[in-house]
Image (cartoon, helix red, strand yellow):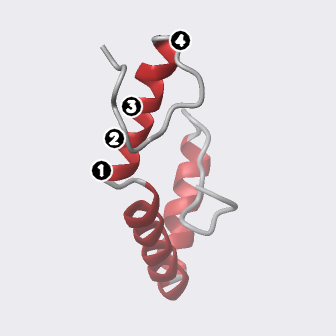
Amino acid sequence: MSGEREGIIVPARNVDALADAILWYYRHPDESQAMGRAARARILSQFTLEHYNQRVIALYRSLAGMHNPSPHSIEGVR
């Protein structure tokens, strides 16, 4: 999440912060819906199957010692 535009970041194991966040969402339904829409848009644009495939191919290539891998070709990946 970036700057609480897509949601509120709550520290792990911090029950008070979680309760505060839940209350904030309850008290600000319009902002909550806007955050939900922003989060959905980010997920749909940045976490697609194509993005995932490109990142996996790049990882395989880096592990295989290939330099300047093209995300559109998988030649040389073993």
Q: Answer yes or no: do the residues labelled 4 and 3 have beta carbons within 8 Å?
A: no
Task: Judge by depth and name the residue closer to the eye, 49 or 42.
Answer: 49
Residue most toward the bottom? 30
> Could you tell me if the residues under marks 2 and 3 are in contact, i.e. CB atoms within 8 Å?
yes
Distance, label 2 to label 1, CA atoms, is 6 Å
| Badge 2 element | helix
Is 3 positioned to the left or the right of 41 in the image? right
Which residue is tagged 1?
49
Q: Are marks 2 and 1 in contact (CB under 8 Å)?
A: yes
Residue located beneath label 4 in the image: 65
Give the residue type that dot 4 points to: Gly
Q: Identify the amino acid type marked 1.
A: Leu
Quote the CA–CA distance across marks 4 and 3: 14 Å
Where is mark 2, residue-wise?
Answer: 53
Determine which residue is flagged by label 3.
56
Q: CA distance from mark 3 to mark 1?
A: 10 Å
Q: Earlier in the sequence, mark 3 or mark 1?
A: 1
Kindly report which numbered mark, 4 or 3, lies closer to the viewer in this rendering: 4
Residues marked 2 and 4 touching at CB (< 8 Å): no
Q: In the rendered structure, which amino acid carries the disc numbered 3?
A: Val
Identify which residue, 14 or 2, lies in the foreground. Answer: 2
Q: What is the C-alpha distance between the residues marked 4 and 1?
A: 24 Å
Q: Secondary structure at mark 1?
A: helix
